[in-house]
Image: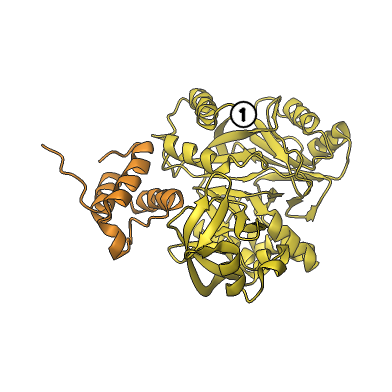
Amino acid sequence: MVATAVSSLTDLANRVERHLNNPASFKAISTRVLLRTGVNMREPKPAQNQDTGLVAKVAAVLAEMGYKF
Amino acid sequence: MDQRLLTREGLRTAFSAQTEAAAAGRELVEQLGTVDAAAVLFFASPAIPGAGIAAALMEHFPSAPVIGCTSAGEFTERGTATCGVSAVVLPRGVVHRAAAALARLDGDVERGIAAAVAQVEKQLQVSLRDADPARYVGLVLIDGLHGSEERVNEVLGNLGPLLSFVGGSAGDDLKFVKTEVYCGGEVSEHGAAVLVLDVAVPFTIVKTCSFEPAGRTFTITEADVPNRIVWELDGRPAAEAYAEAVGSSVQALDSSVFMAHPLGLMIDGQPWIRSPQQVIDGRGMKFYCQILPGMEVDLMRGTDLLGETRAALRNAVAELGGATSGAVIFNCILRRLEIDANNHGEEFVAALGGIPAAGFHTYGESWLGHINQTLTAVLFGR
């Protein structure tokens, strides 16, 4: 199966949520991401959602935590 | 004291006002008594040599890890003070196993935390990445003067992303000269004591502050992140924009204004507080915690510190089914100053509701990240 590129913060959040499969864990990880980036991947602002720079920044923090998509 | 929150058995707490370490250690040990301890924590005035306290506790509880730090005030469920030492024993009925290690941060924070975590993982024979977050919880005491708290929390989050590490930054009674953390027989002025608990009962995390949004949102447009300085809010000099929002002038900004109106990063409707410290070069603002460019933060206004503390702890007890074994609590020094200014020391202790608890007034609080003007705690069930 070929992994598809992450298209948006919403897409990234959905992947994290599916991977964790636990609402409390997803909340903890998204809070850590928000504190480290300022980006709320659960409720991104429309202007942020497809900002490739922000998507890459959040993906990098997730990767540091061991979640690579 | 609220009798409904008392429990038959639970955490053992102690306080000593002795200023000589051996005498304080003896008094703590006498109060703590004989108990099968899984872990011991203490919080001491910088006027009392903490290594001596640690030695006394280690001698009395030889099979339990002992960690501690210097403080900016200490408290238990029976009182709050400065120039003393508080201690708490987590008995084996509450905590199955515990492991601690000292992270030395003066070389490289990541390397220091990783080495400490590796030691803890070896002792517990569990990877923090795979540890069940409903069973394991971490406590972390970080020195309060080197500004390493954000990175410590980030690295802990990288190594155990699902685990909660709750804690506080060591204080030194507002002298801002030297803080220390202790782990077993080790002492560090630039380190972090990391303690991981394999908990035998349900537990919950408390994070509470007494602020609400005041109706003014800023976007950080320029910041010196490592030095915790914000240079611009909404494209304007930070001090100017902030002063205008609080109805003041840049020249009149002082600690009383900053304490009353910190900034808050809103997450799920709750503020994660960033407290201003001082104006820099007449235009920037230094904070007690990092704020990143692009972040949206709200100007805060105060609510009811005692009421919100009481409510947060009551809600946490309810979440645990109505009974608690006790708590380890980290309360910001800025909250203590507000408590002191209102002569509310006894009321603060009363707000703990008689829950067996020990803690200290901190130079910053930790949970998922570094925060200010907040109370964080781990509350254990039965």
Q: Amino acid at mark 1?
A: Asp
On the image, the x and y values in percent for residue A3 come to 15, 40
**Picture layout, residue B338 above or below residue B125:** below
- In-image side of A15 versus B298 (left or right): left
Q: Position of residue B44 (x, y in %)?
A: 77, 41
User: Left or right: B29 with respect to B157?
Assistant: right
Q: Chain of mark 1?
A: B
Give SS at disc 1.
loop
Position of B115 with respect to A43 (left or right) is right
The N terminus of chain A sits in image quarter? top left
| Residue drawn at 58 percent across, 35 percent down | B195
Task: Look at the picture and state if B376 lies above or below B186.
Answer: below
- Name the residue located 31 percent from the left edge and 39 percent from the top edge: A67
Nearer to us in this view, B230 or B310: B230
Front residue of B25/B234: it is: B234
Q: Quadrant of residue B342?
A: bottom right
| Residue B259 at x, y percent in the picture | 67, 64
Image quadrant occupied by the C terminus of chain A: top left
* Residue at the (28%, 64%) spot, across then down: A46
Which of the two residues, B72 or A49, is positioned nearer the viewer here? A49
Question: Which chain corresponds to the colour yellow?
Answer: B
Q: Is residue B266 above or below residue B188?
A: below
Count how many numbered circles sit on residues in the image. 1
Image coordinates for residue B39, horizontal then vertical, percent: 63, 35
Tint applied to chain A in the drawing: orange
Give the farthest residue toward the left: A1
Q: Nearer the viewer, residue B31 or B76?
A: B76
**Dot 1, crowdedness within 10 Å: few (<14), some or many (≥20)?**
some
Is residue B381 visible in this depiction of the protein? no
Q: Residue at x 84, y 46 (%)?
A: B83
Residue wearing tag 1:
B106
